[in-house]
């Protein structure tokens, strides 16, 4: 999977936002067709859609990898040990967390619970 590069963050502004950088000028009228569908890899292909997000991080359509991963992790019960792929088979996307993933369906894979080490939950007590 090729990516569109890295996210470019706007300069901070006060109550009056700064003008859009030229590479984000397309957001004056955002393309509603730029969406990425997130799917469950274990479900049948006609019933595997979990959710959809607008992909407005690139003018050709794309989404910040870290944002996409975090959204999927939350949906998967805060399983941040998962990864994104372009298929049911699960080959991880070759992109850094600050890269922009292009349009297309993405699947979120998490390790099987039987493969995770089991430990007792930690109890934190207030010292007072």
Image: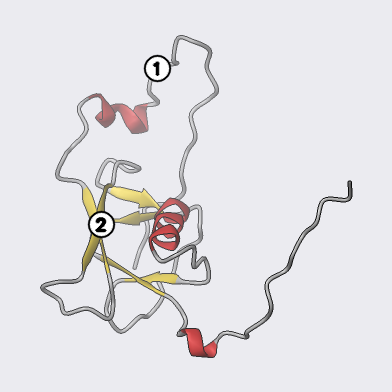
Asked which quadrant contains residue 105, the reply is bottom left
Q: If you read the primary sequence from the N terminus, does the residue marked by circle 2 or circle 1 appear first?
A: 1
Crowding near the residue tagged with mark 2, few <14, some 14–19, many ≥20 C-alpha atoms within 10 Å: few
Q: Image height check: is 105 above or below 18?
A: below
Q: Position of residue 84 (x, y in %)?
A: 39, 69
| Image position of 54 (left or right of 20) | left
At mark 1, the secondary structure is: loop
Q: Image height check: is 86 above or below 22?
A: below
Which residue appears at 55% of the width and 22% of the height? Answer: 12
Which residue appears at 37% of the width and 58% of the height? Answer: 3
**Numbered tag placed on residue 19 in the rendering:** 1
**Numbered tag placed on residue 57 in the rendering:** none
Label 2 to label 1, Cα distance in Å? 31 Å
At mark 2, the secondary structure is: strand
Which residue in the rendered view is the most extreme toward the top?
A: 16
Residue under label 2: 51
Q: Position of residue 6 (x, y in %)?
A: 46, 49
Which residue appears at 48% of the width and 28% of the height? Answer: 10
Nearest-to-viewer mark from 2 and 1: 2
Q: Nearer the viewer, residue 99 or 112?
A: 112
Q: Image height check: is 65 above or below 112?
A: above
Q: Position of residue 45 (x, y in %)?
A: 15, 76
- Image quarter in which the N terminus is found: bottom left
């Amino acid at each position: 999977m090729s990516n569109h590069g890295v996210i470019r963050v706007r300069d901070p502004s006060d109550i009056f936002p700064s003008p859009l950088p030229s590479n984000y000028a397309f957001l004056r009228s955002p393309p509603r067709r730029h969406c990425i569908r997130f799917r469950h890899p274990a479900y049948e292909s006609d019933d595997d859609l979990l959710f959809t997000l607008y992909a407005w991080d690139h003018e050709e359509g794309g989404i910040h990898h870290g944002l996409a991963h975090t959204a999927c992790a939350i949906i998967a019960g805060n399983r941040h040990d998962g990864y994104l792929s372009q298929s049911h088979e699960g080959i991880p996307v070759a992109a850094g967390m600050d890269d922009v993933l292009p349009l297309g369906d993405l699947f979120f894979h998490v390790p099987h619970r039987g493969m995770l080490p089991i430990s007792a939950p930690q109890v934190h007590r207030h010292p007072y």
